[in-house]
Image (cartoon, helix red, strand yellow):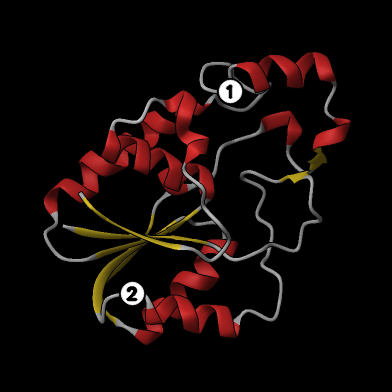
Amino acid sequence: MEIYLVRHTETVCEKGICYGQSDVDIAVPFNEIFDRIISELPSEAIIFSSPLKRCVTLAKHIQENIKTISYQEDERLKEMNFGDWELKSWNEIPSEELNPWMEDFVNIKVSNGESFVQLHERVGNFLSDKISKINQPIVIVAHAGIIRSILCHQSSLPLKDAFNNKVDFGEVIKIDF
């Protein structure tokens, strides 16, 4: 089955801000980028999206421009929960908190947030609950962390190597699942 993983476009946040599950908007203009994304997608698909507006804005545009079999937002497609770090500059996160996480982001949970393994588990639940029952093209509009997790599920790449999967803003990655 074909799955098209689509990362939202750039946000209004300054570079260096940790925004995870914060519901930030996307930067304008985005119409040209949205049109390029549409050109890389199938003409008909089932669409799943993170419920955060930076994804919903793009997913709704896709829904309006391709034949949509169904559209659904799913909480499990939200970006990693960075807890106490949300909307802080990476530079202002105390090194005694940041350094252990940077050394083992897979297992170390952010204060009042989650670890990458927790994100990966919820993505796995989404995949087994939703994707395993479908045999039509699927578009998933989500975040870099979610897309990296899906790629790890698909390729059995160890989670510690998830960042080997480069995922740019507005990128479309087609996989067979």
Figure quadrant of residue 44: bottom left
Please, what is the three-letter code of the amino acid marked with disc 2?
Answer: Leu
> What is the quadrant of the N terminus in the image?
bottom left
Figure quadrant of residue 41: bottom left
x then y, percent, for residue 29: 69, 81
x then y, percent, for residue 46: 25, 67
Please, what is the three-letter code of the amino acid marked with disc 1?
Answer: Phe
Query: Which label's residue is closer to the chain start, 2 or 1?
Result: 2
Q: Name the residue under label 2.
A: 41
Q: Which residue lies furthest to the front in this view?
A: 164
Q: Is mark 1 on a helix, strand or loop?
A: loop
Horizontally, residue 31 falls left or right of residue 88, namely left
- Give the residue displayed 75% in from the left and 33% down from the top: 85
Horizontally, residue 86 falls left or right of residue 147, namely right
x then y, percent, for residue 135: 11, 59
Residue 62 disc label: none
Q: Nearer the viewer, residue 142 or 177?
A: 177
x then y, percent, for residue 77: 43, 48
Figure quadrant of residue 121: top left
Q: Name the residue under label 1.
A: 105
Looking at the image, residue 18 lies above or below residue 168: above
Looking at the image, residue 118 lies above or below residue 163: above
Q: Is mark 2 on a helix, strand or loop?
A: loop
- Give the residue displayed 39% in from the left and 85% down from the top: 64
Q: Say few, some or many: other residues with alpha carbon within 10 Å of mark 2 (under 14 / 14 to 19 / 20 or more).
A: many
- Give the residue displayed 56% in from the left and 38% down from the top: 80
Q: Which residue lies furthest to the right in this view?
A: 92
- Give the residue displayed 67% in from the left and 48% down from the top: 22
Q: Which of 71 and 15 is in front in this view?
A: 15
